[in-house]
Image (cartoon, helix red, strand yellow):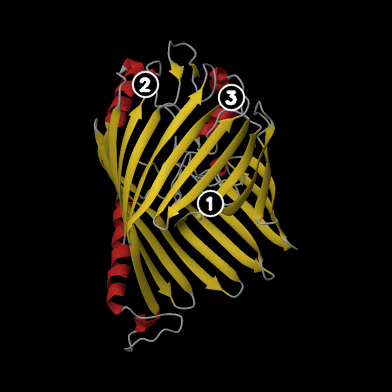
Amino acid sequence: MAVLSMLTVVWLCIGIPGGRWIPAAYGRSTSGDMPSEGLSPEWGGHLRLRGGLTRPDDQSLYQWVGTGTYEDGSAELRLKHQIFLGEWGHFETHYEAVAVGGDTWEKGRDLLRLTNVRLPDGLFVSQSGPLSDDRRLMDLTHVIHDGAEGAFYHRLDRLFLALERSWGNVRLGRQAVTWGNGMIFNPMDLFNPFAPTDVVRDYKVGDDMAIFTRQLGENGDLQVIGVPRRNPENRAVEWGESAVGAKVRIPSGTTEWTFLLAENHDNAVIGVGAVGYAGSAAWRVDAVWTALPAESPSGGYLSGAANVDVSWTWWDKNFYGFLEMYYNGLGETDYSAVGENSDLAAALARGELFTLGRLYLAPHVGVEFHPLVNAYLTFINNLEDPSGVIQPRCVWSAAEDVEIMAGATLYWGGPGTEFGGFPIPGTAARAVPADSAYLWLTWYY
């Protein structure tokens, strides 16, 4: 809390005075002789209100605390601030305050008291709660209230300095980076990847890291990254929890190649990817080999994703679609035995993997009914079960700065499948995800 308060004060001291100056960097005119003339502040952000209905299965673990239709809600305020330091770079801060509560939260707490086991988020019923900085270098999250019916917390999700020089760019602090070319699944993205079922991907959760980027030729680049992390049990910064890596992007004709080499959570990672075009369609392929520690039962595994996307016009409407295939060599076919696969369990706990199986196919289609109204339909299918997820949603730009989104996440599959539900060893319950529907209102400023 002390660190958060101190950094918030620093941010306000830099940002609020900067807002009075309103000078212009990068050649824009300004008046006055103040030393602050090189600074140019920008503000922005959003307020997002979420409402949702969730229906846990009567045979799920929630049978012990009462099923039915759960009503949930949350509110998220994000305040973004940038100070442009002339030609040197910029300093960026994102503050967010989040309130969350409802039946899912309350029932999850009841279940935790009964079983003394916190369920992995999204595996059975999503348990939205305060984000934790236990693994991060800086603890920039403060929980104001964490009760039986909900929680309220605030945090700094971005806090970094970006220096832009002729020899390269350096960014230091709490920030986010995305590697890889996946649409739904992204095996090359090692740092806080989005879950396959995330329908809004405007902001990744930030990590404390250092990034160096250097341009290679006209369209290529080299990126080197270091992510120090703490052991959540003793809060010590340890090499086995941290990550270092490098990624090179090299264009060759109409194809763009990516090569990756990294050490992440004591795992050696090697990856290669390519992006190209076939007629009016674009294609992408990523393949990653992860070498686990010598004492690991799995030894290592291959993962990969390949997709193709295209846009077209039907009935005077604009359409867009893609098809993605994903392979996870660490996946299981006997889902009840997932707890015995320590490598898979560890990857799930760290948020590196989100599914239990091996082979998936994810088609997606979107249509623009009106310049302000778009509808989307996404399928995530486990090809070996089979079972899957269906995600319809509609987005309406109700005003210049207001967006309304309504949708659902629905699961299908027979008994014993990943998304249809499978027995939990030692209990009479099944691990089965819960169908849900939601309505979001977002105001951008």
- Would you say the residues marked 3 and 1 are in contact, meaning their CB atoms lie under 8 Å apart? no
Q: CA distance from mark 3 to mark 1?
A: 28 Å
Looking at the picture, which amino acid does disc 1 mark?
Answer: Phe
Residue ID for mark 2: 116
Indicate which disc, 2 or 1, sits on the residue closer to the N terminus: 2
Image disc number at residue 231: none
**Quarter where residue 263 is shown:** top right
Residue ID for mark 3: 386
Closer-to-camera residue (302/37): 302
Query: What is the crowding at mark 3: few (fewer than 14 residues within 10 Å), some, or many (at least 20)?
Result: some
Indicate which disc, 3 or 2, sits on the residue closer to the N terminus: 2
Q: Secondary structure at mark 2?
A: loop
Residue ID for mark 1: 319
Q: Is residue 341 left or right of residue 256?
A: left
Position of the C terminus by quadrant: bottom left
At horizontal 59% and vertical 69% (from top left) the residue drawn is 168
| Front label number (3 vs 2) | 3
Q: Secondary structure at mark 3?
A: loop
Q: CA distance from mark 2 to mark 1?
A: 48 Å
Closer-to-camera residue (212/151): 151
At horizontal 61% and vertical 24% (from top left) the residue drawn is 332
